[in-house]
Image (cartoon, rainbow, N blue to C red):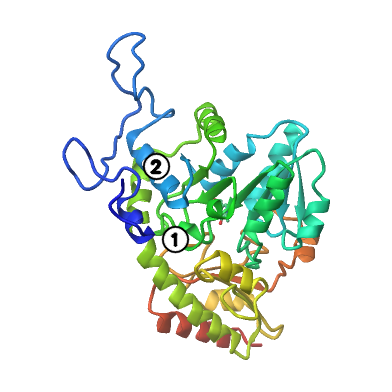
Amino acid sequence: MANYKNIESALIHGGISTDKFTGAVNVPIYQTSTYQQTGLGEEPKWEYSRTGNPTRAALEALIAELEGGKAGFAFGSGMAAITAVLSLFESGDKVLISSNVYGGTFRVLDKVFSNFNIGYSIEDTTDLAALESKITPEVKAILVESPANPLLTVTDLAAVAALAKKHGILSIVDNTFMTPYLQRPIELGADIVVHSATKYLGGHSDVVAGLVVVNDDALAQKLAFIQNSTGGVPGPFDSFLLIRGIKTLGVRLDRHVENAEKAAEYLQNHRAVKKVYYPGLPDAQGYEINKRQAKNGGAMISFELYENYNIKKFFKALRLVALAESLGGVESLVCHPASMTHAAIPYEVRQRIGITDGLIRLSVGIESIDDILADLDQAIAESEE
Ligand SMILES: *Cc1c(COP(=O)(O)O)cnc(C)c1O
């Protein structure tokens, strides 16, 4: 039994946290592809590192514990994790996805799984009645993000999970933006949680990885089979980096969120800013639902400047906040969803779901908030026309 009760401690001591051979307080990096076997037909615990590796196994046990699920699986990227989950489906099946789901999730369904006759449709998952009306016999799962990327749209995760259960289909939550420190979808009834661990879990913009957690033995068996068969696993060193990153997730996120709350308020009161999207603002879409299902509003903000501000100039003028894909690292990053993270989504679809050309997405880092706001302020001033 664990000698702690709270997630702050589980982040540090969860899963398999020490080395039983030496007492080392960190799990060693088992940099090996294979393991010597004791004899023919004697079932080895470890046989080949695609199938299993002790460093990866420690990470998998850790994420399963943090999300409150039965089993965890690690992958070489968030997209490899999502691909493994989508590999649960068969030709003729269909998945409903939230509008403004991550661009890569849309792309793999639209351009890869479509070749295997696995369909998808983009739905407004905030409208439960409309969502239920789309559950036809071929629909096998609902995949949602909350808050969703990049408009920070909040979906009621417990309600979607209940809807999925009622129809005997799976509910899948991409929990990248919140992490188990702020939101635990399995406790809300979700069947599968996926992560781009590249983001907050790793937290330092130095590793690309993905994680999956399931809460059912049969699903765990299927995913273990898919993981070993398709082979999109992370190496031992990346697994170690993630375990190391997760230890500080709590303190990092506390600071990320503190900064984000201040940045959202600052932007909302700025004369150049037309609209701010942040689930922690009381007038945000889904504010009450988010408050119920998550610890707070997280640390991602999107905003639009008025038309007399030139966003190209804004991005050029930034000196501290970096223009980059990705999010969730200690450094503040800003991106232009329409041409970067969501460029894979056709222009007409982007317009329909609100990803306008003027939208700016900000991943608020843990630098001094005064320095972050000063940089935004001078860049906004530079961009006025
Ligand atoms: C980045 C991201 C992904 C993809 O993860 P990679 O690690 O880049 O493959 C999936 N979902 C969300 C919400 C993301 O932000």
Query: What's the residue at 56%, 74% (across, down)?
Result: 315
The residue labelled by disc 1 is 181
What amino acid is found at the position of numbered circle 1 in the picture?
Tyr
Decide: few, some or many residues near mark 2? Use Cα within 10 Å; few <14, some 14-19, many ≥20: many
Q: Quadrant of residue 41?
A: top left
Image quarter for residue 252? Answer: bottom left
From the image, tell me which residue sits under label 2: 61
In the rendered image, the vertical position of residue 360 relative to residue 147, given as above or below = below
Confirm whether residue 335 shows in the render: no
Give the image location of residue 45, x and y in percent. Answer: 34, 24
Q: Quadrant of the N terminus?
A: top left
- Disc 2 versus disc 1: distance between alpha carbons? 16 Å
The 10 Å Cα crowd at callout 1, few under 14, some 14 to 19, many 20 or more, is some
Query: Which residue is rendered at x = 19% and y = 44% of the image?
Result: 24
Which of these two is toward me, 158 or 144?
A: 158
- Residue 229 at x, y = what percent? 53, 26
